[in-house]
Amino acid sequence: MSTLPSHLELVQGIVLPKPVGADPVLDFLNTRADFAGRGPAASEWLTSYEAFVIWNGYVGLLSDASVFRLIEQAAGKPTDASRRLDAVREFQADLYDVLTDDVLTDEAAAGSFDAVARAVDRATARRHLSPVPTDGLGVRAVWELPEDLGMPLDQLALLASELLTGTARDHVRLCPGDNCGWLFLDPRGRRRWCSMATCGNRAKVRAHAARTR
Ligand SMILES: [Zn+2]
């Protein structure tokens, strides 16, 4: 059996990239690599709706029980599941544009912003407030979404809206590695690479080769 590169992990029979973004929304965008804009990526890890659901469980956005039930639902509605995966890919490309392009001056990117805003609107309309126990007085409340095939994307859309409107937005950085394209949070301004094991190491090897030439 061949061993996987250190930035990948085998999860429930599916190869997934390890989270490096320090934010689940950025790690969602990092489930493809070696891409130029909207075109197909050379490495694409969300290869099926099931892989998308398993990724959500892997990064802690869905419980094991939800992953199990959603995979069952997807198996019963394959056409719906593949349509959902298309929507996931669209949202991924649009959100990437919003985080890396100036949507205020670039018309194509402005379309991406509108698409992201619509996805957030749809998710917001579907969530409802539910009470949960608290240690103190009364109850706490949490946002809940109906557990159907649209739920994981809606959850990501809501998290994306929090990222876009919060202080973390200013700390999103793009990895300078060749053809990398991965994003990560860098609140202290000390981080250069998506991961030292991949891009950082490649750059080190290149610099070393250049020095010893
Ligand atoms: Zn990188």
Image (cartoon, rainbow, N blue to C red):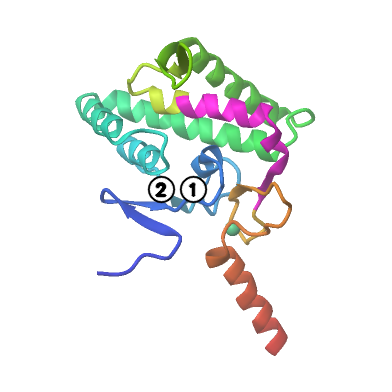
Which three-letter amino acid code belongs to the residue tagged 1? Answer: Arg
The residue depicted at 29 percent of the width and 70 percent of the height is 2
Q: Position of residue 135 (x, y in %)?
A: 44, 22
Asked whether 173 falls inside the magenta stretch, the response is yes
Dominant SS of magenta comes to helix
Question: Who is closer to the viewer here, 57 or 150?
Answer: 57
SS type, badge 1: strand
Packing grade of label 1 (10 A; few <14, some 14-19, many >=20) is many
Q: Earlier in the sequence, mark 2 or mark 1?
A: 1
Q: Give percent across and percent down for residue 13.
A: 26, 51
Residue identified by numbered label 2:
45
Query: Looking at the image, can residue 213 be seen?
Result: no
> For this view, does 139 lie left or right of residue 38?
left
Q: Are the residues at dot 2 and dot 1 in contact (C-beta closer than 8 Å)?
A: yes
Name the side, left or right, on which 75 lies relative to 172: left
Cβ of mark 1 under 8 Å from ligand 1: the answer is no
Percent position of residue 24, x then y: 51, 39
Q: Quadrant of the C terminus?
A: bottom right
Point 24% across, 24% down: residue? 77
Horizontal side of 27 relative to 67 (left or right) equals right
Rendered view: 52 above or below 184: above
**Residue 64 is a magenta residue:** no
Secondary structure under tag 2 reads loop
* Residue indicated by mark 1: 32
**Magenta segment boundaries in residue numbering:** 155-174
Image-quadrant location for residue 177: bottom right
Kindly give the residue lying farthest to the right in the view shown: 105
Image point 55% across, 36% down: which residue? 93
Q: How much space separates mark 2 and mark 1, taking CA atoms?
A: 6 Å
| Image: 171 above or below 98 | below
